[in-house]
Image: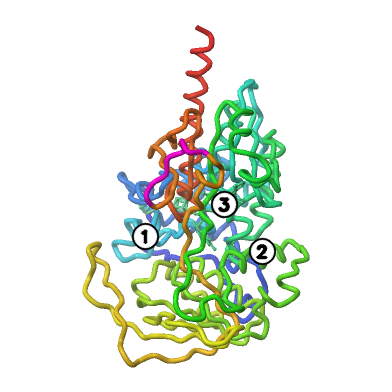
Amino acid sequence: MLKFVNIERDMPSKRDANLRNKDFNEIYAEYADAKAKEQASRCSQCGVPYCQAHCPLHNNIPDWLRMTAMGRLEEAYAISQATNTFPEICGRICPQDRLCEGNCVIEQSGHGTVTIGSVEKYITDTAWENGWVKPISVMAERDQSVGVIGAGPGGLAAADMLRRAGLQVTVYDRYDRAGGLLTYGIPGFKLEKDVVMRRIDQLEQSGVEFVMNCNVGEDLSFDAIRGKHDAVVIATGVYKTRDLEGPGADADGIVRAIDYLTVSNKLSFGDEVPEYEDGSLNAKGKKVVVIGGGDTAMDCVRTAIRQGAESVKCLYRRDRANMPGSQREVQNAEEEGVIFEWLAAPKGFAGDPVNAVQVQKMRLGAPDASGRQSPEVIEGADYNEAADLVIKALGFEPEDLPKLWGVDGLEVTRWGTVKAEFKTGKTSLDGVFAVGDIVRGASLVVWAIKDGRDCADAVLTYLNEARAVAAE
Ligand code: FAD
Ligand code: SF4
Ligand code: SF4
């Protein structure tokens, strides 16, 4: 260990931008065994590991790095999976620069962070290759059951932990495939689909039941699910798109990021998708403008490049340093041919179908109450940006669950997210818990996993207490 002094940080190799921008395969290669060992050995085994403190799951990072450096990979895997339901997924898509790696002590001392995410991915991919990842084998079955609404990372992490405790678990989802945004939001160049699907298979083989194409509130009522199970976990995510304002915003050719990405991801599964075939959600040969500066916008621009767009531009109203998306993703997008127009916001749209975005130039003004500089319009600097496909990627809000499901007793916050206790996910309804984006607002996969795991503990306590009361 401690080899950071003479071994430089080295990420797994990235495929050439001119090759990778034509397909949906992941852009980073896997570490070769020797390279993973070498990179793990750079860790200085801090007594107070800031990497671990800043990982939402508090993964035992120094220990798995040490095991990897020693070539004891099965033990590294055992340590890694003890705190994370999907380590290979987090290793691929966590914004490590803001979490574990951004707080690595040797990064702070100028030597370049330990490549924690890439090693985490390597460990679990190796575990899958060697057959160390097994379906859950339940020691003692219990007759109590839990209904989980939503098969995204939050719901799946809860389902996994609940099944391990011997409970009967049914997951309901309105999509035809499980995985939530892992399956239909995040594109294959960040997370290949078979990486998600093998996890779904593992849960199915573990006895978790999946009821797909079931839109709760429409195909099955929330009360019916509540009546059928001893406890319910709501993990429905956030899907209501923030809308654009300004004249012409309803024109044809202005589409929602989630629809655009879902169609593209369905194609990756080999599905036939009419909206792609008829061109409405297909960037091929088009001048594409994506509006927004978060991860969703980054995924849209890079998808449009891969679909063969004539040009792809991203408009964001603040500058590069103040965008919410990962800097690593911006760099990847630029390498692949995306052009960023910083300090630029849409004012209106010309044509129906759309043929241009009217753009107003912005500058950063005084900081607001949160300390963030607010964008201000520069008068007289407007221009037209030609566009025949405009993608709205301005963020997501929760759907109105109490109204959609007809449950008045389910309390929500003023932002519309479900009100739930921080550590347990307990909601205002007895035996009903909530996790992930529907509680936090649009967040991260790793936080959804953390919520799902914490909530499973609370559900178990609740069911144990219910059983004790029944036995009295
Ligand atoms: P979701 O993953 O949204 O899953 C919710 C599930 O509930 C869905 O399957 C949905 O179909 C189902 N559902 C909803 N309503 C109903 C209903 N009424 N009945 C039945 N089922 C229902 N995070 C990262 O950490 N890294 C990234 O790189 C990253 N990239 C992203 C890219 C995009 C394009 C988007 C949109 C998000 C990204 N995120 C990323 C955020 C991350 O995907 C989410 O924070 C995470 O998926 C939330 O998990 P969840 O389980 O709460 O919800
Ligand atoms: Fe880092 Fe995410 Fe892995 Fe935690 S789960 S160690 S934050 S990559
Ligand atoms: Fe190792 Fe960096 Fe974590 Fe310290 S902070 S234990 S050097 S990975």
- Residue 245 versus residue 155 in the image, above or below: below
- Residue 265 versus residue 65 in the image, above or below: below
Q: CA distance from mark 3 to mark 1?
A: 19 Å
From the viewer's perspective, is the residue at label 1 or at label 2 nearer?
Answer: 2
Badge 1 density bin: few <14, some 14–19, many ≥20, Cα 10 Å = some
Residue 88: numbered disc: 3
Please, what secondary structure does the residue beneath circle 3 have? helix
Q: Is residue 209 left or right of residue 373?
A: right
| Residue at 65% across, 49% down | 174
Q: Is 81 included in the stretch rendered in magenta?
A: no
Task: Give, as a single range, the part of the protein colored magenta.
Answer: 407-414
Badge 3 density bin: few <14, some 14–19, many ≥20, Cα 10 Å = many
Identify the amino acid type marked 3.
Answer: Glu
Mark 1 vs 2: CB contact within 8 A: no
Please, what secondary structure does the residue beneath circle 2 have? helix
Q: Which residue is identified by label 2?
A: 265
Q: CA distance from mark 3 to mark 2?
A: 20 Å
Q: Is 413 included in the stretch rendered in magenta?
A: yes
Residue 167: numbered disc: none
